[in-house]
Image (tube, rainbow, N blue to C red):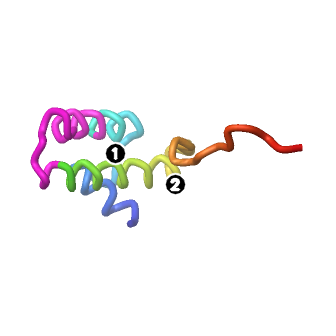
Amino acid sequence: MNRIRALAILGLTQTATKEQIKKSYRELCKKLHPDDNPSEEALKQYLLVQSAYEYLNVNELGTVSYTHLTLPTKLEV
């Protein structure tokens, strides 16, 4: 994925601001969320929107989501 593709998935142009990226992401997630839209196509689009936003977050917005990491339940010394 690249910046242009990620922005296109979110329905934005190359001049989009951080605020516009976040707003578009939230609107699309609300529209496509599996709890609200149970179709298979909506799920595919939802996951694509998630990927695009994560790409932009890591590469442009300067934040990283660590929710996909699993941490050990106990530390060994």
Q: Residue furthest bottom?
A: 1
Q: Which mark is residue 59?
A: 2
Under mark 2, the amino acid is Asn
3 vs 24, left or right, is right
Residue 31 magenta: yes
Q: CA distance from mark 1 to mark 2?
A: 14 Å
Q: Quadrant of residue 5?
A: bottom left
Q: Could you say where residue 12 lies in the image, as x and y percent from the top left?
A: 26, 49
- Secondary structure of the magenta portion, mostly? helix
Q: Residue furthest right?
A: 77
Q: Residue at x 18, y 41 (%)?
A: 32
Q: Quadrant of residue 30?
A: top left
**Magenta region: which residues?**
25-42
Q: Dot 1: few (<14), some (14–19), or many (≥20) neighbours within 10 Å?
A: few
Q: Could you say where residue 68 lies in the image, as x and y percent from the top left?
A: 51, 47
Q: Could you say where residue 31 lies in the image, as x and y percent from the top left?
A: 16, 36
Q: Dot 2: few (<14), some (14–19), or many (≥20) neighbours within 10 Å?
A: few
Under mark 1, the amino acid is Ala
Q: Could you say where residue 3 lies in the image, as x and y percent from the top left?
A: 39, 60
11 vs 21, left or right, is left
Q: Which residue is mark 1?
A: 16
SS at badge 2: helix
